[in-house]
Amino acid sequence: MLQYLVNGLSLGAIYALFSLGLSISWAGLNILNLAHGTVFMVGALTAWLLSEQLPGVPFLLVLVIAMVICGLIGLAMELVVFRQIRRRTSDGNQQTLTTVIATVATSSLLIAIAEQFTGGQPQGLSQDLFVVSGYTVFGIRITNIQIAIIVIAAVLSFAVAWFIKRGRQGQALRALSVDRDMAKLVGVSADRLSALTMFGAGAMAGLAGVLLAVQINAVEAHMGEALLFKAFAIIIIAGVGSIGATVAAAVALALVETFVAAYWVSDLRDVVVFALIILFLLVRPQGISSKGWQRA
Amino acid sequence: MSLLVLDDVKVHYGGVRAVDGVSFSVEPGQLCGMVGPNGSGKTTTINAITRTAKLTSGRITFDGTDIANVPPFKLRRIGLVRTFQGIRLIPDLTVRDNIRLAAEQHGHKRRKSRAGAVTPDAFSEALIERFGLSDVKNERPGALPYGTQRRVEIVRALSTSPKLLLLDEPVAGMNHAERADIANVLKELHAEGLSMLIIEHDLRMLLNLSDHLVVLNFGKLLAEGEPHATASLPDVQRAYLGGSIERD
Amino acid sequence: MIDWLAANAPLLRNISVLALLGYSVQLALRAGVFSFATVGFYAIGGYVTANLLKAGWNWVAVMALVIVVGFVFALVISPVLNRLRHLFLAMATLAFTLFIQSLALSWATFTGGAQGMFGVRRVLPQGAMIAIVVVVVLIVWLTQRGVLGRATSALRHDELLAASLGVNVSRQQTMAFAASSGVGALAGFVQVSTTGVFGPDDISFSTVVTSLTVLVVGGAIIWAGPLVGAILVGTLPLYLVKAGNLSLIIQAVVVLAIVVYQPEGLVGIVKYLFSIIRKPFRKKPRETTAGAPAS
Ligand SMILES: Nc1ncnc2c1ncn2[C@@H]1O[C@H](COP(=O)(O)OP(=O)(O)OP(=O)(O)O)[C@@H](O)[C@H]1O
Ligand SMILES: [Mg+2]
C-alpha cells in the first residue's frame, strides 16, 4: 500500500514537471504546445546519446546539457515558428489554430530526427549513467532516482510558483496573458518574455525526460505521446496556469493510476484517466474555468 | 410601452463592477445617446443587452420579452441587433457577402419569395445601393478605408431589419467628412422611425442627433433626460469633460 | 485509363484515405471547431468495419453503419465539447484520440490488440472508392458556397459576431463536428475494406500528423485543399525515396515551412499566382473606393 504511494508520488513528480511547462506556455502565450511530449523525449534521447558516446559522463552534467538543449528547442520554436506566425496573422482564431498545427509539425520533425538516432527502436539506457540503488525504509523500497525525482520536482514547483507570483518577469507574464497588446503598452517586452517562457518550459520537459528515462531505463522516439494524454487530464482537472493545482492534480492522477493498476486491471488505467477528463469537463460550469491570471 | 427596459442591471467581473445598477429605457422610435468616460460601462451595458455579458443581477426586457429567455442567436429574430466597438467584418467575404450573411439568417429564409416578399439577396442589394456601397460591394473589407468599413457594419446590421439598433461608437476613429457622412445616415434612419441606442464619445454629434441622453459614470447612471439639458448638468460636465461642453 | 487505375491501386487507395482524413479535419476546422478527433473516429470506423466484414456483412451496409456510428458518436460527445472553445476543444478532442489509441491496444477482443486486425475481406471496388471520395469532395464544395458557406466563414472568424447576426453557433458547429466525424469514420472504412488490415500503427500519433499535413499542404480552408494535399502527401514519398533516411526530415521541414509561411497551402499559392496573372485584365482600377456620400 505505502509502496504504491511512493511509486505514485515519483510518477506524479514526473507528470508535474512535464505539465507545468505545458500549462504555463498555454496560460501566458496562448500556445497549446503539442510538441511538448517530443521535447520531453529529446531530453531522454540526449541522456542516452551522451551515455553512449561518453561513457562515464557525470549524471549532473547530463541533466544540465539535456535541459539546455531542450530549452533551446523551446526557444527555437518561439523564434522560428510562433513569433513568425504572430507576425503574419492578426486574426486571433487563425493564429491560435496555425500555432497548434505548427507544434504538431515541429513534433513530427523532432521525431523524424530522433529516429535517425534510435533507428526507430526502443533503446536501453546504459546502467552506469546513474547507478540506481534502492533503500528499504519501514518495508517500503525506494530508489535513489525516485528520491531525486521527488525532490527536484518539489523544488522546481516551488520555484516556478514563486516566479509566477512574485518574480518581476512572472508578473509581466501574467500581464501578457491577460492582454498581449496592453502588456506591451505598459512596457512588458512580450518577445523576450515569450522566449524565456518557452526556454523554461522546454528545459523542464527535458529534465523530466532524463529522469523518466533513467527510471524506466528506456528511450523511444514516441515516448512523449502517452505523457501528453496524462498532461491533458491534469490541465483539465487543474485549470490552465495554476501552479499549485497542477502539481496537486499531477500527483493525484499518478496515484489513481498506480492504484488502479495495482488493485484493479492495469489496462483500465487510461479508461479511468479518460473518464476523469469527461467528468471534469462536465462538472466545471464553464467547461474549464481558469483561475486567476489566465484567459478562459 | 417602452421598447427596451433595463431594470437595475448589474454586471460584475470579480471585483470589477463594470455595470452597477443601471436602469433606463428606450422608447419606440427614439434615438437614445449614451455617453460616459472610458471604462464607465457603456460597452458592457450593450453586452448585457445582447447577452454577450452575463447579468449579475437585474432584468432586461425588449419588446415585452425578458431577454434572459432568448438565446443570443435569436435576439436578431426579435429585432435586436448591434455593432461592436472594434470593426468585425468577415475578412474572407466580400462586402456584399458580409451583408447577405446577415440578411439571410432569418426572416427572408426562402430564396424563392412568396409573391411580394423580398429575397435576402434583393434586400441586401437594395441596402447596398441605398447606402452607396455599390462600388465596393465585390471587394474584401480589409483593404477598404476605415469609414467605409464602419458603414458596411451599419448596413449589415440594418439588413437584419432590426427594431432596435445598438451602435457602439460608430464614428470612432473617423475623419471629419466620414463622421458627417455617418451622422447623415443615422439622421435619415431616425427620421424613418428606427429606434437606436448609440454609444458615442463625440458628444456634439449626439447632441445633434438624439432625443434622449444617458450618462454613465463608474458603472452607474449619472443622469438621463433631454440631451442638451442633461449634458449641461454640473455633475455630467465634471465627470465627462472636466467641465467644458461646447454647444452647437 | 483502366489499366492505369489498376496498376496504381495502392497509390490511389492511399490517396483516397488521406483525402478523406484531410476532409474530415477540414469540415470541423472551417467552421471554427478545433477538432483533433478525426483519427479517433478513423480508428472507430476501421475497427467496426473490420469486425463487421469478418462477420460476413455486406460492404454497403457496413459503410452506411460506419457513417451513422461516426455521426451518432459525435452527437453523443458534442454536449461535452460544446462547452469548450479553441485550445480547450483541441486538447479535449486530442485526448479523445489518444484514448481511443490506448483502448485499441488494450481491448484485444474487438481490436486484435497490438497485432491489430488482418485477413479482412478486401471488398470495396476501386470504382466505389473513387465515388466515395468524389461525393465527399462534392459535399464539401457545395457547402462552401451559398448560405451555409457564408455562415461557416463567419463561424470560423468570429462566433460572437455570427451569433449576433442570427447564426445558431452551437447547432452549426455540432453539425460540422458530426460531419467531420462521419467522414473520419468513413476513412477507416475505406482503409480496412481496401487493405484488409488495421492496427495500432494505423491510428498512431503520426496519423494525426499526417491528417494535418494533408490539410495544410493543400490548403486548410479551400475545398480543393485536402485533395491536392492527399495527392502530394501520397505521391511525394515515392520521389523522396532517393533521400533515404532523410526523407521524413525533409518532409517535416517542408510542412513546417508551409504552416508558418504559407498558411493557405498550395492551392493558396496557385490562386495567388492566378490573381497576379489575371489582374491586368480585370476591369479598370477605380479611383474612388472611399464611401460615397449617403443617399
Ligand atoms: N470581460 C471583462 N472582464 C473583466 N473586466 C471587464 C470585462 N469587460 C469590461 N471590463 C471592465 O469593465 C469596465 C467597463 O468596461 P466597458 O468596456 O464597458 O467601458 P466603456 O464605457 O465601453 O469604455 P470605452 O469608452 O473605453 O469603450 C472597465 O473597467 C473594464 O476594464
Ligand atoms: Mg466601450
Image (cartoon, coloured by chain):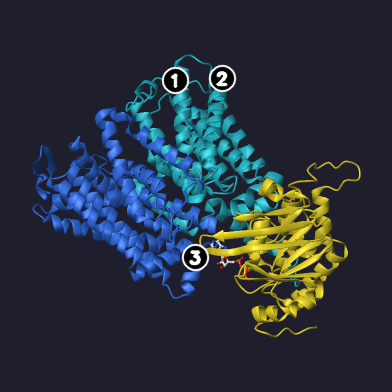
Amino acid at circle 1? Asn
- Dot 2 and dot 3 residues touching (CB under 8 Å): no
C209 horizontally vs A7: left or right = right
Instruction: Name the residue nearer the viewer: C293 or A2.
Output: A2
Q: Residue B177: give x, y in percent of width and height.
A: 76, 78
Distance from disc 2 to disc 3, alpha carbons, whole Å, reads 53 Å
Secondary element at tag 2: helix
Q: Give the labeled residue for mark 1.
A: C51
Task: Say if residue A70 shows up in the picture.
Answer: no
Residue under numbered circle 2? C61
- Circle 3 — which element? loop
Instruction: Check the rendered structure and report the hue given to chain A.
Output: blue
Disc 1 is placed on an element classified as helix
First reached walking from the N terminus: tag 2 or tag 1: 1
- Whether marks 2 and 1 lie on the same chain: yes
Q: Chain of mark 1?
A: C
The quadrant the C terminus of chain B occupies is bottom right
- Quadrant assignment for ligand 2: bottom right
Q: Chain of mark 2?
A: C
Chain C: drawing colour:
cyan
